[in-house]
Image (spheres, rainbow, N blue to C red):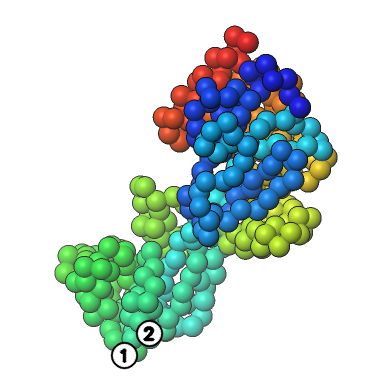
Amino acid sequence: MADETDKSNVVPAGVGDRSKDDQLVYDEIVRTSEIAIETSDSGEGIVVDLDDRDTDIPVDSTDSIPAVRLDVLDESDIVEDIVELDAAEPLRSVLVVEDDDDLRRLIARLLNGKGIEVVEARRGLEALNIVRSEPPDLIILDAMLPEVHGFDIAQKLKSSERYASIPIVMISSLYRGWRIARDLRESYGIEAFLEKPFKITELWATVERLVFSPGRDKPSLSSSAEQLSREGMKRFQSGDLDGAIGCFEEGLRVDPNAAKLHFQLGVLYLKKKGMVYQAMQAFEEAVALEPEHFMALRSLAILYQRKGFRNKAIDMWERALQCSPDEETRAQIEDHVVRLITG
């Protein structure tokens, strides 16, 4: 156990009044349905799904504040407060409405390769039903369709309060020229018009501009890497730690620049005895790719501090401070850094 008087062992976690007990690390109370890892004093990890439980996690505390007592961290004794493991954002979805099967499949392959979920439709009524049941983030719409004309589909959607905000990219081999493009924008409200045949790069540039407009993030993973990430989460939840690690490692071979996968793999390495330094390397990779990855920075700060790399820990705490998610966490980290420097 750590020295009870060693105040540098107090690691802020973002919740709770740390002045209550210098040896306590207060849990982050995760109020979503995301999977989290809670590690007890014994170092044994517990999977927690907070969907079906109260947010108060029963652990040792001098009062009612949720807390975890901090032990010395080494390869065989993982001591970690609640760490978010699956921070996967929902995939962007695009509805491709095109009766030419070859072209529709080509567009679908392009978008899937960019990490976008694709729903396909080849008829007008089918497209409208899909939009009503599960509105996409964008629609690529052929002008000439069986059952309902593309212009009519655009008009119906753009006149609807519920669906008007969905961007539409109209494509056509029959209608051509800048005048028709302007008329479609002004009269039907579509966001973009492409004449067939168009370049795939031109289509992707249009989709990227509309789907990932300011305030909307690009997908962090390719579709195949995302699939491996989800499979890894399933294996982890079922208790297959080695299988989960294998999935995330394979995901990184597919998408080596995915900060999210590096972070998730680091958390799994922490769960496996004897892999603390591999975890640190994985967190370093995540931070190199995403310099403001708060959870990776905070994990590195904790690990460097536990391993005795005081100056490196201070550096990581200061970097985490710059991207703290809220003022309470910022204040706790500031206090901790001051005491780490002066202590």
Q: What residue type is labelled 2?
A: Glu
User: Residue 299 versus residue 194: which sits nearer the camera?
Assistant: 299
Query: Which residue is depicted at the point 54% across and 66% down?
Result: 112
Determine whether the residue tagged by mark 1 lies in a helix, strand or loop: loop
Query: Which residue is depicted at the point 21% across and 71% down?
Result: 160
The quadrant in which the N terminus is found is top right
Residue 225 percent coordinates (x, y)? 63, 58
Q: How crowded is mark 1: few (under 14 residues within 10 Å), some or many (20 or more)?
A: few
Residue 50 percent coordinates (x, y)? 54, 54
**In this figure, what is the number of numbered marks?**
2
Q: Residues within 10 Å of mark 2 (few under 14, many from 20)?
A: some
State whether residue 321 is above or below residue 65: above
**Which residue carries the number 2 mark?**
126
Q: Which of marks 1 and 2 is in front?
A: 2
Left or right: 59 with respect to 15?
Answer: right
Counting residues from the N terminus, which is met first, the one under dot 1 or under dot 2?
A: 2
User: Residue 179 versus residue 47: which sits nearer the camera?
Assistant: 47
| Residue 147, numbered circle | 1
